Amino acid sequence: MEHYSRDEWARIAEQILGERLPGRPRQDPYVESALQNYKIGSRLKGPDCLTWHYCQCGANGIVAAYRDRGAASLVTPSGAFAVVGAHLAGSRTLVINDAGLAADRPAGYYANGKVEIWNAIAAEHMHRIIKDSTVGNGVSITLTFYYPLTYAVPNATGLEICRSIYAEVDQTDAIAAPLRKSVACIPMMGPVTPLYYFWGQTWGMVTIAAGAHGSLGEVDNDRDVYFQTSDGTIQTTQRFAGIAGGTSSEQRAGFLLPNSAGGSQTIIMLQLDP
């Protein structure tokens, strides 16, 4: 019988306990931190059967009025970068011409983000999740991937890069056009200080503030739950006029959990990221 390596055991542990940064202390759910303790996007599977992912709050911050509501990802992809130098098939690294400085591009800035590499031959386009990235030096940044490149990548190849959805999480109304953002998590700890780090719940039992109607599950088959991205509250299918007809595009949050025959309920099974 083949045994797991020490590296493989570490990866298993990180899928449950999160990938803690070297020398940093443990950070439990419901606690925020001014300093980063885990890699952005790290997964924490708690003993309470809930799943959390490690986030950084945006510059707006999540105020008390938005507690127990969905928080949106403000991350947007960029196709403004290109590859620096030629890279061989089998390489796990890629250098890009990101001119950001250390203040804006700390180590791990692109961790758990995604890159699409636009090789000239369409069949050789590649998609990779980023394991880590070096600190910005004003000229370039080196990306490290979880899995190696399948094909060689020539110098100056174009690409599109998107940071982890957990790299900038804020109130849904933090910037304009809230209806064009998606909810990344539920910040169950309450208010979150701008730019602080926190665990956002992404799976499991949760109570989220209901929207304008204020209650769920009052009619037959009123089970599927959707976010109102204008304010992060939830409503069921019956309360959104367009969903039943297949014309609405509100983001699905999960399903109403308990028996609601005796009255309205708001406890749901959150189903964002297991």
Image (spheres, grey):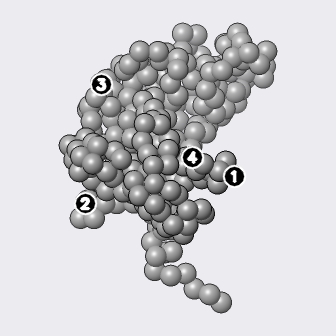
Residue type highlighted by circle 2: Arg
> Cα distance, mark 2 to mark 1?
42 Å
At numbered mark 3, what does the secondary structure look like: helix, strand or loop? Answer: loop
Residue linked to disc 4: 118
Give, as a three-letter code, the residue at label 1.
Answer: Ala
Three-letter code, disc 4:
Trp
In the rendered structure, which disc, 1 or 4, sits on the residue that comes first in sequence?
4
Q: Disc 1 vs disc 4: Cβ atoms closer than 8 Å?
A: no
The residue mark sitting in front, 2 or 1, is 1
Q: Is residue 139 left or right of residue 165?
A: left
For residue 51, say whether it is visible.
Answer: no
Tag 2 residue:
24
Q: CA distance from mark 3 to mark 1?
A: 42 Å
Q: Residues within 10 Å of mark 1 (few under 14, many from 20)?
A: few
| Residue 51 image label | none
Residue that numbered label 1 is attached to: 123
The one nearer the camera, 255 or 95, is: 95
Asked if the residue at tag 4 contacts the one at tag 3, i.e. Cβ–Cβ closer than 8 Å, the answer is: no
Query: Of label 3 and label 4, which has the lower sequence position?
Result: 3
Q: Residue at x 54, y 69 (%)?
A: 90
Q: Mark 2 or mark 4: which is in front?
A: 4
| 89 to 179, vertically: above or below | below
Q: Earlier in the sequence, mark 2 or mark 4?
A: 2
CA separation in Å, label 2 and label 3: 26 Å
Residue type, numbered disc 3:
Asn
Say which residue appears at 52% left-offset and 20% top-offset: 180
